[in-house]
Every structure is written in C-alpha cells, then in structure tokens.
Image: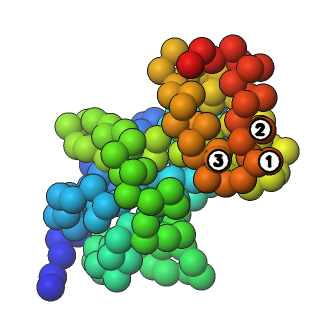
Amino acid sequence: MTFPSIDLAVVDAEPDRWRRVLLVIALLDEALGEREPHRRPTVVGGSAVEFWSTGGYASRDIDVVVFDRDAAAAVLKRSGFEQIGRHWVHTASDLWIEFPGTVLTYGPEAYQRIADVSISGHQVQVISVEDLVIDRLCSGRDADVSWARELVALHQPSIRPQTLRDLGTLNGVAVLAQVDRLLADTQVRS
C-alpha cells in the first residue's frame, strides 16, 4: 500500500514548537487513515508532558505509540525523514520522532481516556493526563515524579482521582502510595 506524504510546509509554517509537534503527528495520523483509536498514532512521553504542562516542559523528540510502525515509517520516509538509530529525523524541520511502542501501556481502557486534540483544523490523540502521571511515577526518576506532581496540580479541577488510584493499584503498592500522597499534597478531591 502506498501512503501519502506529510506536507511539512504546513508544519514549518507553525511558529509555536509544541503546536508543531502536535501538528506533525496529526498529519501523520491523516496520512495513515486509521479511524480506530487503538490504531491511530498517540502522543506519549515527554511530548505529552509538554502538551499537558502547556509548554512548561520541553522534549527534544516526539514519542508516538503507533499500531503499524511500518506504515508510519513509510509515511515518514516518503515525507523526507531519515531513520537515525531509533528516531525518524527531518533535520530541516528539526523534527525527531520515535515509536517506543505499538499499544498504550494500560490496555484498551487507555484508549477511552485519550484526549483528542484539535490543532489547526486537524486532530491528534494525546495520552490522558492520568496515564501520563502514572507513567512518570513508574519511571522512578526524581524529575519525572516532580512532573507528575506538577501535572496533578495543573489539572486538579479535571483530574480523575479514582482513575489515578486504579492505575496506581495496577502498578503495585508503592505506586498507589505515591498516588495517594500526590492527591493529598495537591488537595484533589474524590
């Protein structure tokens, strides 16, 4: 199957860095033509932290979970990206894309929680803030735990405490204890 390329002129015309990140993945999504949430590209990792922190965090690369890596790679190659190690790179546009997985970590339910974000008339999926908080807590790195705390504080009015607790439980007693501390420290109400 032949896939269309991404119009990088549209991406390059966007002056805001994190909007460019979302836009390139939205255009990748359109090129792939998938409609089922679990088959569409989903922004995760540092780029998701960048989105949910409204630019307070900066990620060098764009982490994307995509069901069909080969198809996504074909679109990127056709669009002028080259593979360098684990990244697909477009140096002129300063875009580095990595596909760390083919499915979201927390199962089919994670696709029901994703945020469908509109960017310049295009749609892109971003991992939910709750799944991202758990991802950061599970890394065990101090900086990631700090970002988990920041994300909970930023999204306190809309965060789903029970979802955080359920995801914490899936990851063991230590993570659940961290979730409970986070919720108490940021005064999120159930």
Residue, far right: 142
Upstream in the sequence, badge 3 or badge 2?
A: 3
x then y, percent, for residue 184? 74, 20
Asked if 154 appears above or below 140 in the picture, the reply is above
Upstream in the sequence, badge 1 or badge 3?
A: 3
Q: Nearer the viewer, residue 183 or 38?
A: 183
Q: Is residue 141 visible?
A: yes
Distance from label 1 to label 3 (Cα)? 9 Å
x then y, percent, for residue 167? 58, 46
Q: How many tags in the picture? A: 3
User: What's the residue type where badge 2 is placed?
Assistant: Gln
- Asked which secondary structure carries label 3, the reply is helix
Asked if 62 appears above or below 159 in the picture, the reply is below
Disc 3 crowd, CA 10 A, few/some/many (<14, 14-19, 20+): some
Asked if 139 appears above or below 84 in the picture, the reply is above
Distance from label 2 to label 1 (Cα)? 6 Å
Q: Give the side of residue 6 with respect to residue 106, left or right.
A: left
Q: Quadrant of the C terminus?
A: top right
Q: Give the side of residue 109 with respect to residue 29, left or right.
A: right
Disc 2 crowd, CA 10 A, few/some/many (<14, 14-19, 20+): some
- Asked which secondary structure carries label 2, the reply is helix
User: What's the residue type where badge 1 is placed?
Assistant: Ala
The residue indicated by pointer 2 is: 178
Distance from label 3 to label 2 (Cα)? 11 Å
The residue indicated by pointer 1 is: 174
In front: mark 3 or mark 2?
3
The residue indicated by pointer 3 is: 169
Q: Nearer the viewer, residue 140 or 187?
A: 187
The reply to whether the C-beta atoms of the residues labelled 2 and 1 are less than 8 Å apart is: yes
- Asked which secondary structure carries label 1, the reply is helix
Task: Tell me what residue is drawn at x 43 percent, y 71 percent.
Answer: 102
User: What's the residue type where badge 3 is placed?
Assistant: Thr
